[in-house]
C-alpha cells in the first residue's frame, strides 16, 4: 500500500494551522512573516499532492506551484522592506506597538 | 304758484338751517360774523318759505281737504314700500307760522345776546360764560364791558340744527320723520343746555334733560311700533282714515286694562309728550334747563321743543278720540291726559310763586301753560289747545327774550360797579322801568298776555276758550284751571313788580342800561304778535257774529270729525276776567314795596308751605333717592365691580392661570424630556455606541486577523455543514 | 511500505520544526527552525515526483527567502540579545482557531470521496521538467502567467527598494 492522498492533505492542513498560529500569536513582525511562509508552503504541498494524485498528465498543478513560489518571494521582499521602514520610524518591530491605525 | 312748487318749497323749508349747521361746523367756525350771517340767513330763508306756504294755505278754499302733501318711496318693506314725505294741513300751517317767526326772532336776538362786536374777554374760556373785558379809555381808566362769547359760532350751528329738527317735525307727514325731528331736538337741547359745559351745574342739567326726555321717548317709540304693527302704516292721513280708526277703537283688538288699541297707542305716545313737554312727573328737567343761554331757553321752552310735544298730541287727536264723541264720558286715555294736564298746570303754578330766579319763574310758567294745553286736549277741546299753543309760543318767547334782556342790562351794571350779585335774582333788581323802557313795555305786554289780560292780549282769547270748553265739558278741570290762572296772574305780576317797578335794590340794578337793537327789535316784533295773535280767534258771540272765528274754522278743518264751537256761557268769561285782573292786582299790591334785603312777603303768609314750594316739593330729591342712586348702584357696584371685575375677569384670570400653568408643564414634562430627549437620545445613543464599539479598532493587525478568521471560519463551517448534511 | 515510513518521518520532522519556529523565543532560532521545516517540504516534493519543485524549493525558499528573513532579524534588533516572551496575550484564541481549522478541514475532507485515493501510475516516458518548461512558455498554455509573475517580481523588487530606502 502506498501513501493515500489523505495523509498529504492532513499534513498540509496541520502545517497550515501551525503557520496560522504563528501569524496570530507571535509578537515580532518578522516572526509573523515566518508563519506566513509556513502557510504558503502548506498550500504548495497541497497543490502538488493534488496534481500527483488527480491528474499527473496535466502539468497545470506544477505551474500553479511555481506561481506560488514567485508570489511568496515577492511578498517576503516587500514585507521585509515594510518592516525595516517601520523599524526606522518607530524603533520597534513588535506588532502590537505598531498601532497607528487605532481609533 | 302751483301746488307742485308749494310742495317743493315745503320739502326745502327744513334745509337751510341744516346747511347752516354743517357750514358753520366745518368751515366758518373761526369767523364769527360769517357764522351768524349764515345762520340768520338760513333762518330767514326758512321763514320766507314758511310765509309763502302759510299765505297759500290760508288762501286756499277748504284747505282742510286740499292740503299740500308730497311723499316718496323710502324703504321697500313687503308689497307696499314705506313712504316718507311732507304735509302741510291747517294745523301744520299755523304751527309753521309761529315756528318760523319765533325761530327767526331768536336767531336775530342771539347775535346781540352773545355780545357780537364786543372785545374778547380778559379771562374768558370756552365752556364758561363770558366775564367781561377791560377796556381802557383815552384817560387811561379801565372799565369792564361785556365780552363776546368765545364759542359764538358753535351756538349758531347748534340752534341751526335745532331749527332743522323742529321744521322737520312740523312738515312731516308720518310719525317716523316726526320722531326723527323730535330726537334731533332732544340732542340739540342736550348740547345747548350744556352749552357752557365748564359749569358743573350745566353739565348736570344737560344730562338730566336728556335722560328725562328719554324716558318719555322710549314709551313713544313703543307706541309708534305698536301703531305700525296694528295698522301697517305711520302716515297720518292713512291712520286717521275712518275705517282705520274704527278698527283701532275696537276694545277687543289689543285690549289691555280695558283700553282699546287706539287707547294704548295714544297713551304711549302721550307719555312721550309728558317727557318732551315737561308734564308731571317728567317735568324736572325744564327748570334746570335754564342753565343754558337765554335764547336757548326761549327756543326750547317756547318756540320749539315743548311745543313739539303738544303739537304731536294735537296731531294724534283723532287717534286719541277714536270711538269718542263730544258729550260721551272720556276714554281712559283722555282722562289721564286731562288729569295730568290740569294737575301740572296747578302744580307748576304753585311752585312758580316761590321762585326768585327770573328765568325759573318763566320755566314753571311754561310747564303750567303746557298743562293747560294738555288738559284742553284731554277734554276734547282741539281748537282751543291749538290756539293756546300758537299764542303761548309768541308771548312766552317774548318773555324769555325779555328776561334775557333784563339780565344783560343788569350785567352791564354789574360790570360797571364790580358788585358780585346774581343778575338773575329778582330780589336784586327793581326800578328797571326807567333804565330799560323798551324791555319794560314789551315784557309787560308779554306778562299780561300770559295772565290773560282781557281783550287786548292774545293770551286772553286762547285761555278763555279753554276755560269755556272746560266749563262746558268737565267742570273739575275748569275749577283747577281757573285756580291756576289766578296763580299765573299773581306770580306774573310779582315778577314784573319785583323786576321793573319800585326802586332799584342793588347798585347794579341802578346802573343797568337798555340793550342793543338786535335784542330789542325782536322783542317789539314778538310783542306785536302777543297782542294781535289772539284776534284771529275771537269767538263769534263776542262780535255778535260779525267777525267769523277764522282760527276755529281754519284749524277745525284739519280733522274729519266735526268740532262745534262752544256755546256761550257767561260764567267762564266772568271767571277768566276775575282771575286775570284779580291776580294781577293782588300781585302788584303785595310786592309793590319790597325793599332791598327784605324777605319775600309771601313767606309770612304761607309759612312753612313757602319752603316746600321754593324747594319744588322736594321732587328732585325724591327722584334722586328713588331712581338716580339705585341706578348708580347697579352700574357701579353690581355690573362693574361684581359682574365685570369679579365674575367675568375672575373667569378669565382663572383660565389664564390654567393656561400659564399648563404651558410650563408641557414644556418641562413633555417637550424637554420626550421630544428633545428623543432627538438627543438618538444622537447620544449613536455616540455611546460608537465609543463602545471603536475599541475594537486597536490598530493591531493580529487582532484584526483573529477576529476576521473567527468569523470567516464560523460562516464557512456553518455553510458547509448545512450543505454537506444530507 | 518503505515510502510510508519515510513519509511519516519527514512529516514529523517538518511539523516539529514548524512548531519550534512559532514557539521559539530567540528569533534567530526561529529562522533556523524555519529552514529545517522548508527542507522537510522539499523532501516531500521528491516523494511526490516533483523533482524540479524540490530543487526550486531549496534554492528559492531556503537560499533566498530564509536568508532574507535572517537579514531582517539582524537589522531590526533593539538589543543584542532579546529573549523576552514572544507570544502575545491572545495566543489561546489563536491556538483554538488553529485547532478548529484543522479539525474542521479534516472532517470536511473526510466526507469527500476522493480523499482516500491512491496515487495513480505515472507514464514512464513523460519528463515532468520538460513538460513544465514547455507549459510555461507555450503561448496557448501558461506563458502569460509566467510573464506576469516576472512583472510581479520586478514590481516587488522596485517596491521594496523604495520602501526601505533611507534618505540621507
Image (cartoon, coloured by chain):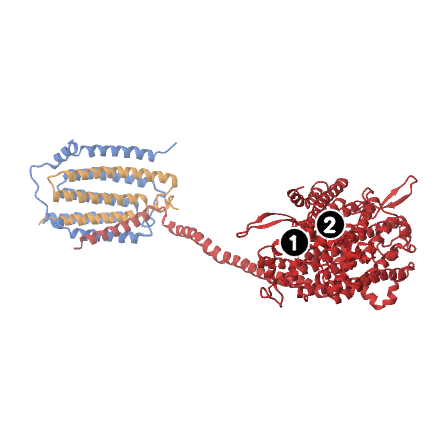
Q: Mark 1 falls on what kind of element?
A: helix
The span from disc 2 to disc 1 (Cα, nearest Å) is 17 Å
Colour chain A is painted in: orange
Colour chain B is painted in: red
Where's residue B204, x and y in %? 74, 57
Residue under label 2: B99
Tags 2 and 1 both on a single chain: yes
Check the image and report above or below for B358 versus B8: below
Where's residue B279, x and y in %? 73, 61
Q: Is residue B207 left or right of residue C9?
A: right
User: How many residues crowd mark 1 within 10 Å: few (<14), some (14–19), many (20+)?
Assistant: many
Check the image and report above or below for A37 versus B304: above
Q: Quadrant of residue B206?
A: bottom right
Where's residue C50, x and y in %? 14, 40
Check the image and report above or below for A56 versus B537: above
Chain holding disc 2: B
Residue, x 61% and y 64% (percent of image)?
B260
Mark 2 or mark 1, earlier in chain: 2
Q: Is residue B156 visible?
A: yes
The circle on residue B179 is: 1
Q: Which chain is blue?
A: C
Amino acid at each position: 500500500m502506498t501513501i493515500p492522498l489523505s495523509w498529504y492533505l492532513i499534513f498540509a492542513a496541520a502545517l497550515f494551522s501551525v503557520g496560522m498560529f504563528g501569524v496570530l500569536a507571535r509578537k515580532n513582525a518578522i516572526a509573523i512573516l515566518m508563519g506566513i511562509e509556513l502557510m504558503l508552503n502548506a498550500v504548495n504541498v497541497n497543490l502538488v499532492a493534488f496534481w500527483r494524485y488527480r491528474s499527473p498528465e496535466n502539468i497545470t498543478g506544477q505551474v500553479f506551484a511555481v506561481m506560488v513560489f514567485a508570489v511568496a518571494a515577492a511578498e517576503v521582499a516587500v514585507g521585509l522592506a515594510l518592516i525595516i521602514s517601520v523599524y526606522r520610524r518607530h524603533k520597534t518591530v513588535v506588532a502590537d506597538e505598531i498601532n497607528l491605525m487605532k481609533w | 304758484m302751483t301746488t307742485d312748487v308749494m310742495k317743493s318749497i315745503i320739502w326745502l323749508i327744513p334745509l337751510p338751517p341744516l346747511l347752516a349747521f354743517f357750514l358753520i361746523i366745518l368751515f366758518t367756525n373761526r369767523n364769527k360774523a360769517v357764522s351768524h350771517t349764515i345762520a340768520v340767513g338760513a333762518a330767514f330763508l326758512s321763514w320766507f318759505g314758511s310765509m309763502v306756504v302759510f299765505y297759500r294755505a290760508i288762501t286756499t278754499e277748504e284747505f282742510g281737504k286740499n292740503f299740500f302733501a308730497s311723499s316718496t318711496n323710502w324703504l321697500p318693506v313687503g308689497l307696499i314700500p314705506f313712504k316718507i314725505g311732507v304735509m302741510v294741513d291747517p294745523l301744520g300751517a299755523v304751527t309753521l307760522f309761529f315756528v318760523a317767526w319765533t325761530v327767526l326772532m331768536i336767531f336775530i336776538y342771539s347775535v346781540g345776546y352773545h355780545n357780537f362786536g364786543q372785545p374778547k374777554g380778559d379771562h374768558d374760556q370756552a365752556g364758561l360764560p363770558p366775564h367781561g373785558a377791560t377796556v381802557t379809555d383815552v384817560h387811561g381808566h379801565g372799565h369792564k364791558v361785556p365780552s363776546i362769547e368765545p364759542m359764538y359760532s358753535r351756538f349758531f350751528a347748534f340752534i341751526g340744527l335745532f331749527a332743522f329738527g323742529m321744521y322737520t317735525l312740523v312738515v312731516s307727514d308720518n310719525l317716523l320723520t316726526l320722531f326723527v325731528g323730535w330726537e334731533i331736538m332732544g340732542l340739540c337741547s342736550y348740547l345747548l343746555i350744556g352749552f357752557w359745559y365748564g359749569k358743573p351745574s350745566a353739565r348736570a342739567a344737560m344730562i338730566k334733560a336728556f335722560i328725562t326726555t328719554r324716558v318719555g321717548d322710549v314709551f313713544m317709540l313703543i307706541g309708534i311700533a305698536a301703531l305700525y304693527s296694528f295698522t301697517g302704516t305711520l302716515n297720518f292721513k292713512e291712520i286717521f282714515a275712518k275705517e282705520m280708526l274704527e278698527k283701532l277703537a275696537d276694545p277687543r283688538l289689543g285690549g289691555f286694562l280695558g283700553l282699546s288699541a287706539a287707547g294704548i297707542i295714544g297713551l304711549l305716545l302721550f307719555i312721550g309728550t309728558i317727557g318732551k313737554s315737561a308734564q308731571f312727573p317728567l317735568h324736572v328737567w325744564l327748570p334746570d334747563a335754564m342753565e343754558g343761554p337765554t335764547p336757548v331757553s326761549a327756543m326750547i321752552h317756547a318756540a320749539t321743543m315743548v311745543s313739539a310735544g303738544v303739537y304731536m298730541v294735537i296731531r294724534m287727536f283723532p287717534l286719541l278720540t277714536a270711538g269718542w264723541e263730544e258729550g260721551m264720558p272720556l276714554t281712559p286715555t283722555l282722562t289721564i291726559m286731562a288729569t295730568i294736564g290740569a294737575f301740572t298746570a296747578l302744580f307748576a303754578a304753585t311752585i312758580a310763586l316761590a321762585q326768585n330766579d327770573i328765568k325759573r319763574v318763566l320755566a314753571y310758567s311754561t310747564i303750567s301753560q303746557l298743562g293747560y294745553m294738555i288738559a284742553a286736549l284731554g277734554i276734547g277741546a282741539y281748537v282751543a289747545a291749538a290756539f293756546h299753543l300758537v299764542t303761548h309760543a309768541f308771548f312766552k318767547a317774548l318773555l324769555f327774550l325779555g328776561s334775557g334782556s333784563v339780565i344783560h342790562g343788569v350785567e352791564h351794571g354789574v360790570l360797571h360797579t364790580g358788585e358780585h350779585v346774581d343778575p338773575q335774582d329778582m330780589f336784586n333788581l327793581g326800578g328797571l322801568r326807567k333804565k330799560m323802557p323798551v324791555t319794560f313795555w314789551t315784557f309787560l305786554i308779554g306778562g299780561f298776555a300770559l295772565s290773560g289780560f282781557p281783550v287786548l292780549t292774545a293770551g286772553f282769547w286762547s285761555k278763555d276758550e279753554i276755560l269755556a270748553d272746560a266749563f262746558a265739558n268737565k267742570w273739575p278741570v275748569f275749577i283747577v284751571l281757573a285756580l291756576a290762572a289766578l296763580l299765573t296772574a299773581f306770580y306774573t305780576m310779582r315778577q314784573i313788580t319785583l323786576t321793573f317797578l319800585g326802586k332799584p335794590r342793588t347798585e347794579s340794578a341802578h346802573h343797568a342800561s337798555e340793550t342793543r337793537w338786535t335784542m330789542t327789535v325782536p322783542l317789539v316784533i314778538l310783542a306785536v304778535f302777543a297782542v294781535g295773535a289772539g284776534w284771529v280767534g275771537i269767538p263769534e258771540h263776542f262780535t255778535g257774529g260779525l267777525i267769523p272765528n277764522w282760527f276755529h274754522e281754519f284749524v277745525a278743518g284739519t280733522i274729519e270729525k266735526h268740532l262745534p264751537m262752544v256755546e256761550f256761557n257767561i260764567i267762564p268769561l266772568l271767571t277768566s276776567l276775575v282771575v286775570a285782573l284779580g291776580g294781577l292786582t293782588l300781585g302788584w299790591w303785595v310786592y309793590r314795596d319790597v325793599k332791598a334785603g327784605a324777605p319775600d312777603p309771601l313767606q309770612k303768609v304761607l309759612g312753612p308751605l313757602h319752603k316746600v314750594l321754593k324747594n319744588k316739593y322736594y321732587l328732585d330729591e325724591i327722584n334722586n333717592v328713588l331712581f338716580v342712586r339705585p341706578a348708580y348702584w347697579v352700574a357701579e357696584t353690581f355690573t362693574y365691580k361684581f359682574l365685570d371685575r369679579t365674575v367675568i375677569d375672575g373667569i378669565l384670570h382663572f383660565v389664564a392661570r390654567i393656561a400659564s400653568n399648563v404651558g410650563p408643564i408641557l414644556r418641562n414634562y413633555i417637550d424637554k424630556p420626550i421630544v428633545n430627549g428623543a432627538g438627543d437620545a438618538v444622537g447620544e445613543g449613536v455616540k455611546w455606541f460608537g465609543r463602545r464599539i471603536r475599541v475594537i479598532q486597536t490598530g493591531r493587525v493580529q487582532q484584526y486577523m483573529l477576529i476576521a478568521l473567527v468569523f470567516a471560519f464560523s460562516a464557512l463551517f456553518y455553510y458547509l455543514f448545512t450543505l454537506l448534511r444530507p | 511500505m518503505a515510502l510510508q515510513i519515510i513519509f511519516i518521518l519527514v512529516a514529523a520532522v517538518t511539523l516539529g520544526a514548524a512548531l519550534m519556529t512559532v514557539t521559539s523565543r530567540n528569533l534567530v532560532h526561529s529562522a533556523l527552525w524555519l529552514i529545517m521545516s522548508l527542507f522537510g517540504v522539499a523532501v516531500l516534493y521528491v516523494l511526490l515526483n516533483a523533482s524540479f519543485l524540490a530543487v526550486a524549493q531549496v534554492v528559492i525558499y531556503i537560499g533566498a527567502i530564509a536568508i532574507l528573513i535572517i537579514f531582517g532579524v539582524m537589522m531590526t534588533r533593539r538589543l543584542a540579545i532579546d529573549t523576552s516572551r514572544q507570544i502575545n496575550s491572545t495566543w489561546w484564541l489563536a491556538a483554538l482557531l488553529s485547532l478548529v481549522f484543522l479539525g474542521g478541514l479534516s472532517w470536511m475532507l473526510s466526507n469527500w470521496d476522493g480523499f482516500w485515493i491512491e496515487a495513480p501510475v505515472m507514464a514512464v516516458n513523460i519528463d515532468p521538467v520538460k513538460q513544465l518548461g514547455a507549459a510555461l512558455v507555450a503561448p496557448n498554455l501558461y506563458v502569460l502567467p509566467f510573464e506576469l509573475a516576472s512583472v510581479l517580481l520586478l514590481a516587488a523588487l522596485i517596491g521594496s527598494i523604495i520602501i526601505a530606502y533611507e534618505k540621507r
